[in-house]
Amino acid sequence: MSVRVRIAPSPTGSLHIGTARTALFNWLFARHQGGQFILRIEDTDQSRSRPEFTQNILEGLQWLGLNWDEGPFFQSKRLDLYRQAIQTLLDQGLAYRAYDTPEELEAMREAQKAKNLAPRYDNRHRNLTPEQQAAFEAEGRPAVVRFKIEDDRVITWNDLVRGRMTWQASDLGGDMVIARAATATDIGQPLYNLAVVVDDQDMAITHVIRGEDHIANTAKQILLYEALGAAVPEFAHTPLILNTAGQKLSKRDGVTSISDFQQMGFTAPALANYMTLLGWSPPDAEELFTLADAAEKFSFDRVNKAGAKFDWDKLDWLNSQYLHQLSANNLTDSLIPYWREAKYSFDPETDRPWLEQLAALVGPSLTRLPEAVGLSRFFFTPTVEFSDAAKTQVQQAGVAEILQAILAALKAGESLTQADAVKALVTQVTKAQGVKKGLVMRSLRAALMGDMQGPDLVDSWLILHQRGFDQTRFEYALTLCSE
RNA sequence: GGCGCUGUAGGCAAAUCGGUAAAGCCGUCGAUCUUUCAAGUCGAUGUUUGCGGGUUCAACUCCCGUCGGCGCUGCCA
C-alpha cells in the first residue's frame, strides 16, 4: 500500500514554525516513499477559525516548497461525515449523551483537585436511566456526546520515532467528549479527536506524523479507530521546537510564524533547510541541502527524540550561505522589493545591469535580505554623509591633491568601465603624487563612500561611476578637505 | 497532583547488534587574504555522555533509584 500522509493545520493563527516543521517531515517522508502528501484544514472550531489564516497557511507552505498532492480539504465542509460516525457510536452504545453543565463539571474538578486527585470526568452520566435522561431533557439541558473509555484498557503502539509506547486508558481523563453540546435530539459540533480519526480513515492516511504534544491524543484516537472498525495507522511523534529557555516555541516568543521569517529576509530554501535540521540529522555530514536532497535521505530512525532548541545564529549562517550562492540575477530579483520599499530611485528595467552589479557587490556581505538596504544606500544618491573617520581621512595632508588629480582625470574624460582602468588610474595618481598607495586607497574610500569601511572599493567605484556619482562625491569631499 | 516523553560540550548533533566518545555544523578565539568590513581559507577552544548505584571482560547505549526539563491532563486544535 502506498504511503499517504497529511498535514492538518488549524486556521486559528498564521502558519506556525512548528506546524511548518511537521508539514516538512510529512512532506519529506511522502517524497521519500513516493507517497501522497495531503493538506487538510481543521476548522471545526468555527469561532476561532479565520479565512485569512487559511490563506496565510497555504501561502506559507507553498513558499517553503511543500507542495501537496491532494486538498486542501476543509473539515467545516465534512461535518455530516463526523455526525454520521458519532451517530454510529451512539447506536452501538459506544458513546452516550451527557447532560452535565459546565458549572457541574467545574465543581467536580475543584473537588478532585481539593483531594489532590487528577482531574477527570467521573463518567457519572454513562449509565443514566431513561427516566433520568427524560428529566434532564425536560429541564431543557443540552447534551454533549461522550465516547466511552474503559479504564482497564492498555493502549500501545509502535511509534516510528519513539519505539514502543504504552498508555493506561485510566489516565485518559474519563469518557471523552466528541461532540459539543446541542439539544438532546441533535448532535453538536464534532470535536477534534473524532474528526481527525474519521478524516484520517476516510482519506486512507497510512502514517500520522505530528508533534509530540499529541501523544496523549494518539491513545484516545486509537480507541476511536477501533470503535469505528478502522485500521489504525502508523504514528510518528516528532520532537518539539523549543525556545532558548527550553519551552515549546509559542506566539509569546515573538517571531514564530513563517510569514514573519519571510518578512525578516530569510529565504525559503534556507529556512526549510534549517527546519529539517531541527530534530533530524542527515546520514552524511552534509548540512546544506535542498528539500529534494533531504527527501532522498529522510528516514524516521534519524529523527531525534529530545526537543530541539531554536538557534538563530545557525539559521543566520545558513541563510547567508544561501544568499552567497545566489546568482546576481536571482539576488537582484530578491533585492528589488527591498530597494523599492526604501524608496531608492532606479528603473528596474533600464537599470537592470547596474542593479545586478550592485547586487553582486553587496551579496557576499548579506546574512538577511533587508541588510542590503543599508549596504547599498549610498549607491543611489549623488552625495553622501561623511562619518567623522572619513572626514579626518580626507583632511590629511596631501589628500586634497590626490582627489584633485583624480577629479581632473575624470573631467578629462577618463572612462572607468573595467577594474583594470580604475587600478591603473590609482597607480598613476599614486606615482604622480609620490605618496603611498594605502593613503590613496583610504582617501578614495573616504571620499567616495563617506565611511572607512564597506564593500570592495574598486567595484564600488565602478558602480558609482556609471551614475556619475563619483565626480559629485569627489567635488564634495574637496570642500571638506580645507574645513 | 497524575500520566507521558526526554537529558551527550554555549546551540544543533554523530556514535549499526552494549565494545571502550564526544564525527560534523553553528558559536567563540586566533591567524591568513585585503585598501576597510564581511565573505573565504587555515587553526584553536569545549568532554568523561544530568547525578548515584547495578549487570557485564566492556555501558552514552541494559536495569534500579534520583534530580532536572518539557508535554499532556478542555464542550481548543
Image (spheres, rainbow, N blue to C red):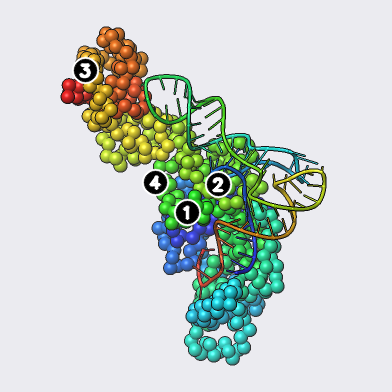
A265 relative position to A8: left or right: left
Q: Residue at x 21, y 17 (%)?
A: A400
Q: Chain of mark 3?
A: A
Q: Chain of mark 4?
A: A
Q: Mark 2 or 1, which is nearer the eye?
A: 2
Q: Which residue is mark 3?
A: A400
Are dots 3 and 4 in contact, CB under 8 Å? Answer: no
Where does residue A141 sit, x and y in percent of width and height?
50, 84
Q: Which residue is mark 1?
A: A16
Q: Amino acid at mark 4?
A: Gln
As measured in the structure, the alpha-carbon distance from the residue carrying label 2 to the one carrying label 3 is: 56 Å
Q: Secondary structure at mark 2?
A: loop
Q: Secondary structure at mark 1?
A: loop
Ranked by sequence position, the earlier of labels 2 and 1 is 1
- Tags 2 and 4 both on a single chain: yes
Q: Residue at x 39, y 39 (%)?
A: A369
Q: Residue at x 59, y 82 (%)?
A: A125
Are dots 2 and 3 in contact, CB under 8 Å? Answer: no
Q: Which residue is mark 4?
A: A263
User: For residue A278, which numbered disc appears in the image?
Assistant: 2
A239 relative position to A60: left or right: right
Q: Amino acid at mark 1?
A: His
Ranked by sequence position, the earlier of labels 3 and 1 is 1
Q: Secondary structure at mark 3?
A: helix
Q: Amino acid at mark 3?
A: Ala
> Would you call the spot at circle 2 few (<14 residues within 10 Å), some (14-19), or many (20 or more)?
many
As measured in the structure, the alpha-carbon distance from the residue carrying label 2 to the one carrying label 1 is: 14 Å
Q: Mark 2 or 4, which is nearer the eye?
A: 2
Ranked by sequence position, the earlier of labels 2 and 4 is 4
Ranked by sequence position, the earlier of labels 2 and 3 is 2
Q: Mark 3 or 1, which is nearer the eye?
A: 3
